[in-house]
Image (tube, rainbow, N blue to C red):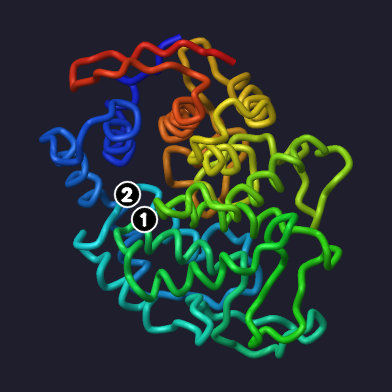
Amino acid sequence: MEAPTEWLLSGEPFVEYRTRLDLLGQSADEPAVRSAHANMLAGPQVRRLVDDLAAWPGETIAGHKSAGLLLHKRTFVADLGLRVGDDGVDRVIARIMEHQSAQGPFQVRMNIAPRYGGSGVDTWAWALCDAPLVVYALAAMGLADHSAVCAAVAHLRGLVRENGWPCAVSEEMGTFRGPGRRDDPCPFASLAMLKALAQFDDLRDCPETRIGAEALLSLWSASRERHPYMFYMGTDFRKLKAPLVWYDILHVCDVLSRFPWLRGDERLRDMIGVLWSKMDDEGRFTPESVWTAWKGWEFGQKRAPSRWVTLLAWRIAVRAGVVEASPELSDRDEIDFRFEG
């Protein structure tokens, strides 16, 4: 089976841009890549996202799962590959940098009801289901060496326990804690932390990333028995869904595939096998669930294959080493993939 690269390249500019970088291995300086990047930035949907982010932090967060939050829009913009210097990005970064806690993590505006241990008023604070995503976006946009970003990731990294990252929050959030046992790891916090740490060359293979990866892979192996903080790996988890907002198979595989030392891990290969079983005869993938906040995007429907979801699936397989790609690629080359799982 060959990746449908011609089909991917004929899609929207953000798909073409990431396809050229992630599947064709082209340099960011190549004319075709630069053109796709420029077209992506000029596209109305991406332009609207960047304009929306100028209002950071946007609405007060009462629950992190809402896919339309600026928190998740900013993460997606980073997923696309927007960087420092791109039109509108520096303004967004400046807004984020305005609110950094004394401990290091960047803050968002939250309102936790008293019955859950909060104050019931809008508060600048952070939690492990948002702070790592802020770090991820800043690092992915080119600020991995910035002193403020390094301070944030250092504090968050230090919160790990022997079984992963817990449900941890800043002191401004009072006694709030998610619906789980105190000693359990929080699957989403662990996923978000791994996503952030993968952006730092010197942290991609540190003890904390290995602990976090083991936490998620162990949960996959025990998916019928263990559901900490009510995060399941059942039917809904296994549905293809974009963008990568919450705790689902595409997001978990995408993050874990960023760690080369996990190549060959049978649990990850098993998870990717479930993902791969959803491919059609042309190497394409169709969303099985959608976020209504993203219904205007090409992946915000369940009727037809999505180029973005297809790109994510093939990229995961390439990173994880379950498909083999030709080492020498150019604008005209076809990728010869061979499934090894």
Describe residue 188's horizontal placement relative to residue 27 as left or right: right
Quadrant location of the C terminus in the rendered image: top right
SS class of the residue under badge 1?
helix
Which percent across, then down, holds residue 176?
75, 79
- The amino acid type found where label 1 is placed reads Ala
- 58 w.r.t. 81: above or below: below
Residue 58, horizontal then vertical, whole percent: 46, 75
Within 10 angstroms of label 2, few (less than 14), some, or many (20 or more) residues?
Answer: some
Q: Is residue 115 above or below residue 314?
A: below
Where is residue 122, by image quadrant?
bottom right
Q: Are marks 2 and 1 in contact (CB under 8 Å)?
A: yes
Residue 244: image location, x then y, percent = 52, 47
Q: Which residue is mark 1?
A: 140
* Disc ID at residue 81: 2
Q: Residue at x 54, y 73 (%)?
A: 155
Using residue 182 as the reference point, say whether residue 42 is left or right of it. Answer: left
- Along the viewing direction, whichever of 250 and 288 lies nearer the viewer: 250
307 or 1: nearer the viewer: 1
In-front residue for pair 285/29: 29
Q: Residue at x 70, y 56 (%)?
A: 164
